[in-house]
C-alpha cells in the first residue's frame, strides 16, 4: 500500500522525504545544503546518499561538497582569478589572455574590442558568447544571455560551495580558433592527488544537429567502455598531439588536491588552459555501466573532514 511505501522511504532516507515536503512551502535555495544534496542524489540515482561510508565517485563528490572545503577552491573556480594562479604554476604561455572584465553588459566598450573575441562569465558554466565578426555581432542576444547569467548564483544549483563567494563578472577573452576546423578540441583530465587517471574528449558541442559526444580514456589514452551523460562518438577521437604535455600540466596544476578535473584546449599545436572543475556533473550523473562509478570512487581518496 502507498502509506507503507511512504513510511519505508522515510525510514530509509528521512532527509529526502523531508525535502520533498519542504519544497511545497519554501524555495529550494532556502533548504540546507546537506538536505538538498541528499534529496538531489536520491532523485538522480534512486537510492540514499551514503555520507558515512561513501564508495562511489558520485557519493564522494557530494561528501566533498559538505566536508572537503578548502578556501583556495573559490579562486580556482573563478575563471578570471584562476588565470594568475595558473600562470604561477605552469606559465603564462598556457593561459588565454583576458582583454577586460565588466560588472555588467552595458559596461562593455565594443569599439575597444578586436574584430574577434569571446565573452564569458567567470562564475558559472555555459555562458560563452563567441564573436567571429564584431560588425555583425548580435548584441541584444548576448546581453540577454550574459545579463541573466550574472543574476545567478551557481552555488545554489548543486550546492557546489566554491562558487558561493565568486563575484559574478563578464570578461572578454582573446579569440582562438583551429586552422582546419571551427570546433576547438576540449580535453578534460580527471586528477586524483596530482595523478591523471582518466580523461574525456567532448565533440559535436557546436553542432546543433547532433548531441554532444563524450569519449573517455585512461591515462595511456586507451578508450574506456562506458558513458557518462552523453553517448560515445561514432568515430573515436584521435589522440591529441600534445597529449603528454597536457597530462604533465594537469598533474602539476592538481598537485596537492584530492580531486579536480583540469581542462585544456589544443589549438594549432598549442595548449591552452580551460578551467578547473571540482564536481564533475555536480556529482549527479550516472555511469553506464555503473561499475565505473565505483572505479572512479576507488581513485578518490577523501581528505580529513573539515567543518
Image: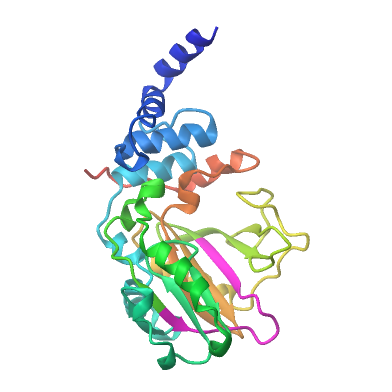
Which residue range is magenta in the image? 172-189
* Residue 86 in the figure: left or right of residue 180: left
* Residue 250 in the figure: left or right of residue 242: left
Residue 209: horizontal and vertical position, in percent? 73, 63
Q: Residue at x 52, y 92 (%)?
A: 115
Q: Is residue 83 above or below residue 123?
A: below
* 142 vs 283, nearest the viewer: 142
Residue 239: horizontal and vertical position, in percent? 67, 70
Q: Is residue 258 above or below residue 115?
A: above
Residue 182: horizontal and vertical position, in percent? 66, 79
Residue 262: horizontal and vertical position, in percent? 46, 65
Give the image quarter of residue 291.
top right
Quadrant of the image for the N terminus? top right
Q: Is residue 38 above or below residue 106?
A: above
Residue 148 seen anywhere in this rendered image of the structure:
yes
Q: Is residue 42 magenta?
A: no
* 291 vs 78, nearest the viewer: 78
Pick out the residue farthest to the front. 140
Q: Is residue 181 magenta?
A: yes
Q: Residue at x 42, y 85 (%)?
A: 97
Residue 220 seen anywhere in this rendered image of the structure:
no
Q: Residue at x 43, y 68 (%)?
A: 146
| Colour scheme of the picture | rainbow
Amino acid at each position: 500500500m502507498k502509506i507503507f511505501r511512504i513510511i519505508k522511504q522515510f525510514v530509509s532516507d528521512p532527509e529526502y522525504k523531508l525535502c520533498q515536503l519542504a519544497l511545497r512551502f519554501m524555495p529550494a535555495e532556502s533548504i540546507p545544503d546537506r538536505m538538498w544534496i541528499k534529496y538531489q542524489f536520491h532523485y538522480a540515482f534512486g537510492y540514499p546518499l551514503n555520507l558515512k561510508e561513501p564508495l562511489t565517485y558520485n557519493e564522494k563528490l557530494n561528501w566533498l561538497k559538505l566536508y572537503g572545503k578548502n578556501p583556495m577552491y573559490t579562486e580556482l573556480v573563478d575563471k578570471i582569478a584562476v588565470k594568475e594562479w595558473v600562470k604561477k604554476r605552469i606559465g603564462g604561455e598556457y593561459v588565454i589572455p583576458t582583454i577586460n572584465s565588466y560588472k555588467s553588459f552595458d559596461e562593455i566598450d565594443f569599439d575597444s574590442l578586436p574584430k574577434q573575441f569571446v565573452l564569458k562569465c567567470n562564475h558559472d558554466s555555459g555562458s560563452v558568447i563567441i564573436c567571429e565578426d564584431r560588425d555583425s555581432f548580435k548584441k541584444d542576444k548576448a546581453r540577454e544571455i550574459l545579463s541573466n547569467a550574472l543574476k545567478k548564483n551557481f552555488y545554489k544549483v548543486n550546492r557546489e560551495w566554491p562558487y558561493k563567494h565568486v563575484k559574478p563578472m563578464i570578461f572578454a577573452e582573446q579569440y582562438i580558433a583551429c586552422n582546419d576546423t571551427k570546433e576547438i578540441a576540449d580535453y578534460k583530465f580527471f586528477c586524483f592527488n596530482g595523478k591523471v587517471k582518466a580523461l574525456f574528449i567532448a565533440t559535436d558541442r557546436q553542432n546543433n544537429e547532433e548531441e554532444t559526444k563524450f569519449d573517455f580514456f585512461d591515462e595511456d589514452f586507451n578508450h574506456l567502455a562506458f558513458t557518462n551523460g552523453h553517448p560515445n562518438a561514432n568515430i573515436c577521437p584521435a589522440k591529441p598531439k600534445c597529449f603528454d604535455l597536457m597530462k604533465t600540466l594537469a598533474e602539476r596544476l592538481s598537485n596537492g588536491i584530492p580531486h579536480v578535473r583540469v581542462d585544456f584546449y589544443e589549438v594549432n599545436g598549442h595548449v591552452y588552459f580551460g578551467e578547473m572543475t571540482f564536481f564533475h556533473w555536480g556529482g549527479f550523473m550516472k555511469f553506464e555501466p555503473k561499475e565505473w562509478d565505483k572505479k572512479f570512487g576507488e581513485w578518490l581518496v577523501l581528505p580529513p573532514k573539515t567543518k
